[in-house]
Image (cartoon, rainbow, N blue to C red):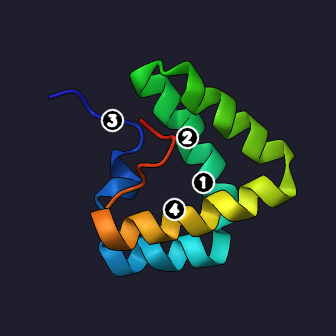
Amino acid sequence: MENKITEMFENLPLWAKILLLVVAGTLISPIYRILRYLETKNTTTLIVGILCLVTGCGNAILAIIDIITEVTKGRITVLAD
């Protein structure tokens, strides 16, 4: 099975992922999406990742959405597949 770039984050315990997203979610969210693009080649994921890096408000909103999806689904799913 091929190793994924984002697998290291996805394999963390839920409490660790939530803690990281609360503390550094505005940095983790866009970088996760850019790395996810390298795996899936989904252009939308790349565009959202880049836009979130350069916009403050969108980045903060996406970080909150990522926390919610981690709690409910166990992984980042919104605009990241």
Q: Which mark is residue 66?
A: 4
Image spot of residue 2 (x, y percent) = 22, 27
- Badge 1 is on which residue? 29
Q: Residues within 10 Å of mark 3 (few under 14, many from 20)?
A: few
Q: Residues within 10 Å of mark 1 (few under 14, many from 20)?
A: many
- Residue 12 seen from this side: no
Q: Residues within 10 Å of mark 2 (few under 14, many from 20)?
A: many
- Badge 2 is on which residue? 33
Question: SS at mark 2?
Answer: helix
Q: Residues within 10 Å of mark 4 (few under 14, many from 20)?
A: many
The span from disc 3 to disc 2 (Cα, nearest Å) is: 13 Å
Question: SS at mark 4?
Answer: helix
Q: Amino acid at mark 3?
A: Lys
Q: Which mark is residue 4?
A: 3
Question: Pointers 2 and 1 in contact (CB under 8 A)?
Answer: yes
Q: Amino acid at mark 2?
A: Arg
Q: Decide which of tag 1 and tag 4 comes sooner along the chain.
A: 1
Image spot of residue 59 (x, y percent) = 74, 56
- Disc 2 vs disc 4: which is toward the camera? 4
Q: Decide which of tag 3 and tag 1 comes sooner along the chain.
A: 3
Q: Amino acid at mark 4?
A: Asp
Residue at horizontal 61%, vertical 28%? 46
